[in-house]
Image (cartoon, rainbow, N blue to C red):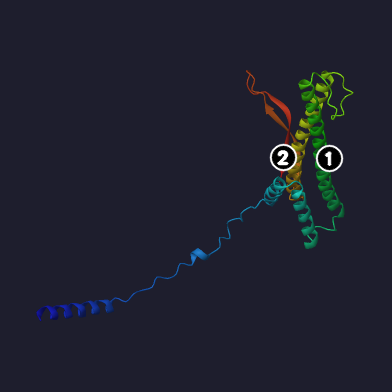
Amino acid sequence: MRFLLLLITSLLTFATVKAQNPVVKKPADTTKDRIDTLRSPEYVNLGKIAGKKAVRRSLIFPGLGQMYNYGLVVEDVKSGAVPGKRIGQKIYLIGKMGAIYAGGTLLVMSYIDNRHEYKRFLSELQYRQLNNNQPNPDGNLSQYTNTEALTIAKNIYKRNSQVVLISLVGLYGLNVLDAYVTARLKYFNVDDTLSFKISPSTINNNTMYGYSPAPALKLTIKL
């Protein structure tokens, strides 16, 4: 009974103290939502972003980077960012895509033809080595009376196929480079704020006799 009275007294005391100390809400911190008007906006290099996108597309499949650049021109025309319809620039981009596909097709056809001839001459040489230097009746190369001429022809076709492969790799790389440069140049700044100034100046030759000025020209570029 005594313990129960003590417990009730303690609860009443705690409730009284709690009521005398109300919870005070802290004011909300509004500084987090403020915008710093003194800080300059972060610079976004649109040319670099467009260049990366064009490179990725060209690496996936040749010509996709040029198609992306064509789309950029179409968007500028529709939004009115550039005057006119840019028909010449559109034709130029389409022409580059056609040149890429035409060149790639010709190189692939040339590679297939050279590999076919290489294998034909190689098969003829192997047949003659196994048949006492007799020509293969099904090979259509009986006009080559000695194996030396066959060997020379085989090596020529092999070298041609290797050159064509290198040319294909070069065309692929050129396609990527062209897409990147075209995308970067689209955002290249050539407005009136870009200027340079050439003025006379002097430089110090730092000779053993002390200061020795020499005439020079100073180039100042304003971006």
16 or 194: which is nearer to us?
A: 16
Place residue 139 in its image quadrant: top right
Residue lying at 28% horizontally and 79% vertically, measured from the top left: 19
Residue lying at 77% horizontally and 37% vertically, measured from the top left: 168
63 or 116: which is nearer to us?
A: 116
Can see residue 189?
A: no
Amino acid on which disc 2 is placed:
Thr
Residue found at the far left of this picture: 2
Residue 76 in the figure: left or right of residue 88: left
Numbered tag placed on residue 106 in the rendering: 1
Residue found at the far right of this picture: 143
Place residue 71 in its image quadrant: bottom right
Instruction: Please provide percent x and percent y for residue 155.
Output: 79, 24
Amino acid on which disc 1 is placed:
Leu
Residue 204 in the figure: left or right of residue 95: left
* Mark 2, residue position: 220
140 or 57: which is nearer to us?
A: 140
Q: Secondary structure at mark 2?
A: strand
Residue lying at 76% horizontally and 34% vertically, measured from the top left: 165
Q: Earlier in the sequence, mark 2 or mark 1?
A: 1
Q: Nearer the viewer, mark 2 or mark 1?
A: 1
- Where 28 falls versus 189 (above or below)? below
- Where 194 falls versus 40 (above or below)? above
Is the residue under label 1 in contact with that under label 2 (CB below 8 Å)? no
Instruction: Please provide percent x and percent y for residue 182.
Output: 76, 47
Instruction: Please provide percent x and percent y for residue 126.
Output: 77, 24
- Where 193 falls versus 30 (above or below)? above
Can you say which quadrant of the picture contains the N terminus?
A: bottom left
- Where 120 falls versus 151 (above or below)? below
